[in-house]
Image (spheres, grey):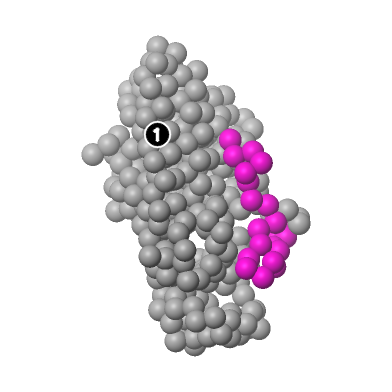
Amino acid sequence: MTRLIVVLALVAAVVTGCGGGVGLADDGAVSAVAAVYPLAWLAERVAPEADVSLLTAGGAEAHDLDLTPRQRSGIERSDVVLYVGDIGYQPQVEEAVRSASGEVVSLSDVAGGRVLRAAEDAHGDEEGGEHGEEAVDAHMWFDPEIMADAAGRVGLAFAAADPAAAATYRENASKVRDELVALGGELKDLLGGPCPLNEVVVSHRAYGYLLRPFGHTQHGVTGINPEAGASSSKLGELIAEIKAQGIGHVVAEPVEGRKDAEAVAREAGVQVLEVSPLDAVTDNEAGTAFPELVRQQARQFATALGCP
C-alpha cells in the first residue's frame, strides 16, 4: 500500500470524525496538498516518501469544494501545494493558495495555451457560465502531454522544498513523464483510428482533452458546470439526434448529469456506459494507478464511438 493510499485513509477518517481536513506532516516528511486526485497521484509518484493529502479524499465533490478551516490551514502551511489553477473551478482553494507558504504548482499554468476555453459541444453551443464567455474546462488531466509536463513541474517543486532529495525527485519525475508519454500513445491507438462515429453524447461535458486530439466531439447533456442541468427542449434534441445518427450509447458519470443522461438513453433506446471525470475518485479507484483509470475511460469512449 502506498503512502498516498495510507494518507487517503487517514483523511477519510478525519472527514468522518470531524468534518474533514488536511494535516501537516508530523514525522519529518515533506508535506503536500493536492486539490484533485490526478495531482495527488503525481505527487505520490514523484515523492513517494512525502505525506500527500487529497482535498477530495473518498470521492468528495471536487467542483466548488468547501474547505474546512483545517484544510485551509493545510494549504497555507504545506511544503508543496498542487491545484488546478485560478480558473474558477475551486474558488475557495484558489483563494487559500494565495496565502500558501510552500511551493505551488498550477495545472492551468503548466497547460498554458492548451487550456480549452469557451468549450463547444458538437453543435458549437458555448457555455459562458458564471465566469464569463471564456468558461474553462478544468479537466486537463485527460491530456497526457499536459500531465507529463506537470510531472516535471512537480519534480521541481519538491526539489525546491527538499533540496537534499532533489536528484531523486527529478529522476522520479522523469520516469513519470515517460509513463505519461507512453499513455498518450495508447490513447492514440484506442481513439485515433477510423471510427464510425466522431461524436459522443456525455452526461457532463468534461472530456474535451481526451477526445479533441483525435477529432472527436462531445455533446453534453450538461455543460462544464454540471449543476446547470438541461432543459426539456435540449433533452428532446439530444434524443432526436441519437436516433437520427445511429448513436448507440450515452456515456454517463455516477453523479454529474446522471438523471438526465439516463432519461435520454431510455427514451432513445440506447445503453449507458459508465465513465468518471477522475477529479475525485472512490477509495477503491484510488488503489488503481491514474494511467489505468484514464485507459478505462478511453476504452468506454472507444466503445461509444465504435472504434476498432
Q: Is residue 99 left or right of residue 55?
A: right
**Mark 1: amino acid:** Asp
Which residue extends farthest front? 194
Q: Is residue 240 above or below residue 154?
A: below
In front of the other: 150 or 196: 196
Dominant SS of magenta comes to loop
Question: Is 117 included in the stretch rendered in magenta?
Answer: yes
Which residue extends farthest right? 133
Residue identifier under label 1: 178
User: In terms of image quadrants, where is residue 40?
Assistant: top left
Which residue is at 32% across, 23% downward?
27
Position of residue 284 measured from the top left corner of the image (x, y, whole percent): 29, 53
Please report the bounds of the magenta region as a residue range: 110-131
Where is the C terminus found, in terms of image quarters? bottom left
Position of residue 305 measured from the top left corner of the image (x, y, whole percent): 46, 69
In front of the other: 96 or 204: 204
Q: Is residue 286 left or right of residue 116?
A: left
Which residue is at 51% across, 47% downward?
143
User: In terms of image quadrants, where is residue 177?
Assistant: top left
Question: Is 101 included in the stretch rendered in magenta?
Answer: no
Which residue is at 54% across, 69% downward?
199
> For numbered disc 1, what is the local secondary structure?
helix
Which residue extends farthest left? 1
Position of residue 1 measured from the top left corner of the image (x, y, whole percent): 23, 39
Which residue extends farthest top? 164
Which residue is at 41% across, 28% downward?
173
Q: Is residue 219 visible?
A: yes
